[in-house]
Amino acid sequence: MSQTLKEIAEQLERSDPAAIRLPLCFGGHRIDVLSNSEQLVERLSDYFQAFDEGESSREPDIVIRAHHRLPPELDLTFHEWSREPGKRTRKEAFCDLPDGRVVLKVRTGMQFLVGRDLRIAVGDCLTHPNQVVNFVNFQYTSHLMNQGLVLGHAAGVALGGKGLALAGLSGGGKSTLALHLISSGLDFVSNDRLLLGPGPGGTRIFGVPKHPRINPGTALANPDLRSILDDERREALEKLSRDELWQLEEKYDALIDLVYGPGRIRLAAPCKALLILAWNHRNAASARFRAVSLAERRDLLDAVMKSPGPFFLPERGPAPKGYEPPDPTGYLEALRDLPVYEATGGVDFAAGVDFCRELLEQDG
């Protein structure tokens, strides 16, 4: 095959034209997904249905193509994408071309073409639809980052049109707290990734349209989520200690619309505050909450920042060729007007719910 992204894309379109359209709208941004597979479009439609805001009349901001077929045999030299410290599994490799980048998923062989106005997934999409879902979300995230927002390793919730961002040190339980807050009546914004930046009237947050994947401890601790576990597994898990549950690697899908009912997702909101969970489940002290300055607490800023990975190509400047620590300057600028709080002491989700609701229920 040819060695430019555009020519590869043209050959894919000639051999397997992506003519079936799925219009989507996330956070006020229009996305069209085009595919040659009606079955794939149906699966994507089912997955994104709860997140889609239904605005399909205007031109799309992003067009993504997904070709279900054998991956093309490209005469390319791929380079391993180095991951952040502590993560050793080889997940992706990449090859930069004059007009973009090809990313290879090492385990599945799925290939992704990313360039200016080119966003293409190709491979066995029906066996790996989750990778197509992730690719759609990567492109939505990249679109927002190129508009000046920063990528946060954070969850998000909202109450009455006001949002709250939740970040945490490793194992802090940000997703668990977010789901407890949703059980208390708040809306879901995002589970593990959040875009933050200035907007009219202050900081805004944008969620990523992806259902949470939760660990067993989260499911057991929340009555709304216990039904995700079958009876046999739930009984076995209930015999484990808190520490044993904390160490498990199992994950379960928590489909927000099925667990909590329709109308509980809000992908964009003005942000009232950021809460960073620095508490610890081995700490016997009571949970405490206090205001902090990120400019003075780089350790807490590290908990918020997230490197975007190989799919992000900045509109200005060179594309990274492996993991690069995020630049704190952009985060401090994006969050400079946002109140920030720290939770310390022992993990106490009930206290966390009370604190967060009090923040969001305040006037102003």
Image (cartoon, helix red, strand yellow):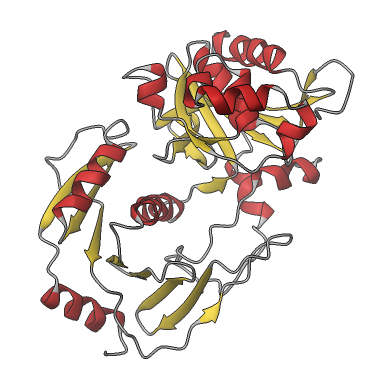
Residue located at (70% from left, 43% from top): 303
In the rendered view, does 349 fall on the left or right side of 74?
right
Q: Is residue 322 above or below residue 343?
A: below
Q: Quadrant of residue 234?
A: top right
Which percent across, then down, holds residue 58?
14, 43
Residue located at (49% from left, 26% from top): 230
In the rendered view, does 57 fall on the left or right side of 81?
left
Q: Quadrant of residue 153?
A: top right
Which percent across, then down, holds residue 245?
71, 32
Q: Is residue 267 above or below residue 220?
A: below
**Placement of the C terminus among the 4 image quadrants:** top right
Q: Is residue 72 above or below residue 105?
A: below
State the residue in front, 244 or 91.
244
Question: Residue 339: in sight, yes or no?
Answer: no
**Placement of the N terminus among the 4 image quadrants:** bottom left
Q: In the image as oriented, which residue stretches furthest toward the front?
A: 232
State the residue in front, 80 or 290.
80
Which percent across, then down, holds residue 306?
61, 51
Question: Residue 180: in sight, yes or no?
Answer: yes
